[in-house]
Image (cartoon, grey):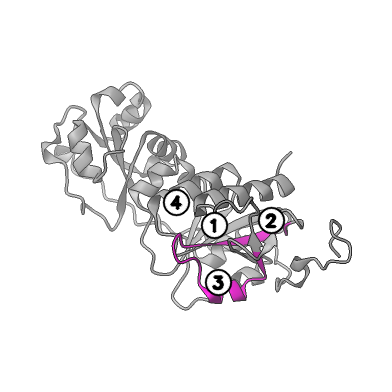
Amino acid sequence: MDKKNPGRENPWQNARIKPAARRDDNVRKPRESTPLREAPAASRTTSHDTASSVPPQAHRREVETRIYGRNACLAAFAKRPQDVRKVYLIEARLGEFKPVLAWCVKNRLGYRVVENEDLDRLTEAQHHEGVCFEVRRHAPLSVAELARGCPVDEAALLVWLDGVGNPHNVGAILRSAANFGVRGLILPAGSPALSGAALRVAEGGAESVPLAQAQAREDIAETLHEAGFAIAATVPRAGVGLYENKLPPRLALILGAEGEGMSMQLINDADVRLTVPGSGAVESLNVSASAAVLFAEFWRQHSAK
């Protein structure tokens, strides 16, 4: 029975979740890319190299990725300095990134002072904020690894993206997810790695939110239910109002693509259709704005002190 609405059935009580097993110490740890071999000393760059030999965009793409933007780069260095492979920055950033450059010198890693136009070409963007890191890429977790990594005695919110491809929306979702303690983000099977633009917009949030990627034909819902998660498909209208019932402490939210929305199969397979209420003056919120509202309400109910 819904306490706020006597006589009305709580929509979450029929969720197809199963008792979650306690975290097993033997759960496989996140996979990491093979460490790069150290370059010969003669080939390493120094702090005052010019940009004339900036490597092409495809440089070691299988094991490295590029992060740009002040906060994204600082967060990467704070969380995993051992993964930084090379640094490019404009002269105006030298003072702020002095600890990073000291790390590069200590670990015999190259850094280069470049012009703004060089970073435009290197990042294929104009919003790099004067700095770019090449960092070691990490393989995403499996959905099962992500779900099992959430302790059963703690509230946990997971986000499942269905076709959300705009990098600015993905980045904004990651930023909000980090702020509200979301335990992980699930990417669909076959989706590309997060782009530099998404990482920049996330403002460092991507370093705090674990990523998982589904496999082709994987039954994600079954995996989540097995781990004790209820699943909510977020829809713009005709769903259960976000504030009408208490949210389950273990919840996976499906967020749909910006234009066409999420697939009907996912909507039908979800335990509940959830809607963010509003005035009706506009058709719906942008997916990243909707995500922030949803995350904030879960945080209010289960995490806020």
Mark 3 belongs to which amino acid?
Ile
97 within the magenta span:
no
Q: Which residue is mark 2?
A: 242
Q: Name the image quarter holding the C terminus.
A: top right
Q: What is the C-alpha distance between the residues marked 4 and 2?
A: 21 Å
Amino acid type of the residue that numbered disc 1 sits on in the rendered structure? Glu
Measure the C-alpha gap from mark 4 to mark 3. 22 Å
Q: Which residue is mark 4?
A: 169
Circle 4 crowding by C-alpha within 10 Å: few under 14, some 14–19, many from 20: many
Secondary structure beneath dot 1 equals loop
Residue lying at 58% horizontally and 72% vertically, measured from the top left: 267
Q: Is residue 304 above or below residue 213?
A: above
Q: Amino acid at mark 4?
A: Asn
Q: CA separation, marks 2 and 1? A: 17 Å
Which residue is the site of mark 1?
283
- The reply to whether discs 2 and 3 touch (Cβ–Cβ < 8 Å) is no
Mark toward the start of the polypeptide (4 vs 3): 4
Question: Which residues make up the magenta segment?
Answer: 247-273
Q: Quadrant of the N terminus?
A: bottom right
